[in-house]
Image: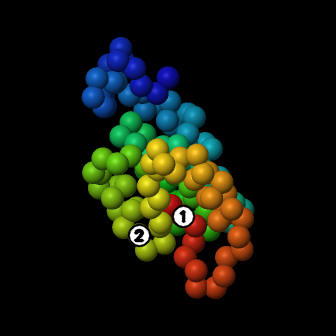
Amino acid sequence: MLAHVDLPGPPRVGKYGVDLGVMERLALPSLRPTATEEATGRLVLIDELGRMELACTAFRHAVDALFAAEVDVVATVHTHRDPFTDALKRRTDIEVVQLTPANRDVLPGELAARLQQPRTHGSPPSHG
């Protein structure tokens, strides 16, 4: 359990206490290997880059390493203002795609089709 109203924190996100140990035990081991050269060309899905997850400094470092690696990243990102996610969204190799009620059913297929296309020289990576 990452967060619960009965967890004491810190940190606290709204009414929820966050157990950062859960992030370190569960999320980090799955992210670290993908930021290495052996993972070149792989796809990493992150659900999500939100307040609770970003409270873990080691998680932020692992995400930074992913975006520096030669992997495709598809991540859900909270809409709140945050220095970490705001900086990611400003990167030139990132495309932000807004999920809306109108596109939520077709967007997974569209993203999958785009990620299956071979990259051409000069085209931006598929981070986003």
The residue that disc 2 covers is 91
Compared across the picture, whether 122 is left or right of 12 comes to right
- What's the residue type where badge 1 is placed? His
Residue at x 72% of width, y 74% of height: 118
Asked if one can make out residue 34 in the rendered structure from this viewpoint, the answer is: no
Residue closest to the far bottom:
121
Residue type at mark 2: give it.
Answer: Arg
Q: Where is residue 64 in the image (x, y as percent from the top left)?
A: 47, 58
Tag 1 secondary structure? loop
Mark 2: give few (<14), some (14-19) or many (20+) Cα within 10 Å.
Answer: few
Residue closer to the observer: 2 or 25: 2
Q: Residue 75 carries which label?
A: none
The Cα atoms of the two marked residues, 1 and 2, are separated by: 10 Å
Q: Residue 76 in the image: x percent, y percent?
A: 48, 48
Earlier along the polypeptide chain: callout 1 or callout 2? 2
Q: 97 and 92: which one is in front? A: 97
- Label 2 near label 1: C-beta < 8 Å? yes
> Relative to residue 1, is residue 53 depicted above or below?
below
Residue 127 circle label: 1
- Residue found 38% across the figure and 28% down from its top: 18
Quarter where residue 71 is shown: bottom right
Relative image position of residue 59 (x, y in whole percent): 47, 46
